Every structure is written in C-alpha cells, then in structure tokens.
Amino acid sequence: MVPTSHRSEAPPPTPTGRRVDESMTLLTSMMERPLDPGYAAAAERRVAAGLPASTGFGTPVVVVASAVVGLLLTFGALALRAPSTAAAKAKADLVSQIETRRAASDRQEATLRSRQADIDRLQKEALGGQQAALQARLDTLSLVSGSEAVTGKGVVLTLDNAAGSDSNSADGNPRTGTGTDEGKVFSKDLQIVVNGLWEAGAEAIAVNGQRLTSRSAIRFAGEAILVNYRPLTRPYRISAIGDPSGLQTGFAENDGGSYARALHDNYGIRVSMDTADSLTLPAAASLTVTEATVPRPRTGATATPTRSRTNSPAPTQATSTATPSPSETSP
C-alpha cells in the first residue's frame, strides 16, 4: 500500500489576506505533510515496479543481525557477572593457607599451655615444704600476670555490630560495599569498654577467650580486630571475673559504661551485660620474660645479682589501665 499523506483544512485567511498561522511555517508543514516528499516518491516508484512500499524489518538479514547482537550482549553480561577463574583460585588458596596456619597456631598454643602447666606443677613440687611462703607469693604473682587460668563469678559483656551494617557488594569487595562503618565495632570501642571493666574492679578479663594482661594489645587490622595479635570474630564477648553486682554498678557509673550506652543509642551497636556464676578464663599464652634476676647461693658474703635483658618490643597499644587483684583461685 502506498503511504498517503493526510492534509488538514487550512485555516481561513484573515480579513487582511494573511493566514493566521503564517508565522508557524515549520509546524504547519509538519502537520500537513508528515511524510517527507522524497520518501513518498520512493514508495510510489516501488509500488509501480510491483514491490512493497517499504523494505520493513522482517528481512532475513535483519533477523540474523538482531540474533547475533542479542547473543553478544548475553555473553558479555555473563562474562561480567561471572568471577575470574584465576582470582577465585587464588582466593581459595589464600583461605586454605590461612585456615591451615591458624589450626597449626592453635595446636602450638595448646601445647604451650600444657608445658606451662607442667612447669607450674614442677615449681610447686620444688618449692614445697619450707618454701611455702615463696610458693604462695608466686601463685599471687601468677594470677596478677595472667600466666594461670582462673575461675570465679563475674559478668559477660557482649558487643556486636548494628543490624544491617555488614552488607557488602555483590563481588564481596568491602571497598565497594553499600553498608556504612558507623554501626561496626572498632578496636577503640573494645579498648574503652575493657578499661571501664578494669576500673569497675575486674580481677581478670578475656575477650573471646584471649586473656588480657598488662602487655596485651587490642588493635585493628583491615576488617579484623586483633587481641594478642590473634584475629577475633564477632560478636565480641568480654568475660570479666569479679563481684557481679559491683562490676555492673561500677561499670555503669564510669566512662566505659557511658561510652557503651552511647554506642547503642547513637550507632545502634548491640550491647548486653549478663552475670555468670562461674567463668573460666584461660592463661595467657603470649607472656615473655623481659627482665630476670638470678640470685646466688648465700655464703655469708654479699652477692651481687646479675641481670639479663632481652630485646622484646612492647605492644603499641596497651589495654589495661588498672592492675587486677588476684582474689580468685586457679582451677
């Protein structure tokens, strides 16, 4: 069918002989002749030759081209969505190495604690009898330094990220994640809360099973919080041995309690404190002797002690500001 153009009735001329729409020549031409005269003439020639008025979009070439373009777009989208094989393999290898080395570290730590228990038993046997006072003082210092496990009543304070603050991007990259960091627990938060528990009268503290001493460090490395240079997983359970009622009251009144309430009220971080009738905190496995004095046998003359010092760097961030009192007993 030959396309036909529709003409509208021209508006009547004005009394002066000019058309009302004379100033809108372009719009009038588009309304009166929607089909370009060149296209109309080409369509008439095709009809005269016995061909369709237009080529249309149903030719085989157009169909094949459309199918090829669609396949290319589909393959491109799949290639962009699928992770790189090499990157996925490298990530799997790194995860496997981390898990293997972490398991080996846990076994070595268990062995170290077993050997330390044997040393403590042999010390008690060697210092028994006439040196009972020296053994009692050694037990007291062991509890203060955290080299022995302790058991007693206390409280468990739990910190966890705010709900919805752990969303990451589709590719698992935290740099492109949509979540914000305001609702996450930082190492500074743990430091302030732990110091608040020491100030409230805690006698021994452990964070997710990591015993804190005067040499412990709570640090932040990337997305992980390190305690004693060991990464922790949330939620963060801070176990403190001491009088439960005194710890709750003292913590609520000091800066640590105020800071914990501000974390909950301002950032939605989940904070809870529960009492416990029996808590067992493990011994610290990262204690290192930095200074030792070797006494000589008394022979009547004054002996001058010799002193040896090892170069052991102190942690960059100490968490305890108060010294715990060793009133609890070791299991």
Image (cartoon, rainbow, N blue to C red):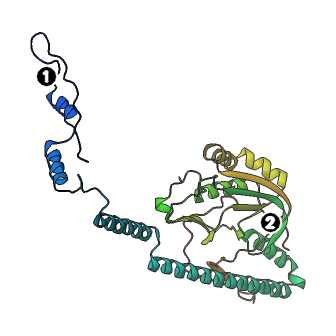
Q: Position of residue 87 (x, y in %)?
A: 46, 77
Q: Is residue 13 above or below residue 317?
A: above
Taking the spot 64% from the left edge, 52% from the top edge, the residue there is 163
For residue 22, the mark is 1
Local crowd size for mark 1, using a 10 Å CA cut-off: few (<14), some (14–19), many (≥20): few
Image quadrant in which the C terminus is located: bottom right
Q: Would residue 305 be seen by someone viewing this image from the given angle?
A: no
Which secondary structure, mark 2? loop
Q: Which residue is mark 2?
A: 326
Q: Position of residue 286 (x, y in %)?
A: 65, 76
Extreme residue toward the right, this view: 129
Residue flagged by tag 1: what amino acid is it? Answer: Glu
Tell me whether circle 2 and circle 1 mark residues in contact (CB < 8 Å): no
Which secondary structure, mark 1? loop
Label whose residue precedes the other's in the sequence (2 or 1): 1
Q: Would residue 166 be seen by someone viewing this image from the given angle?
A: yes
Closer to viewer: mark 2 or mark 1: 1
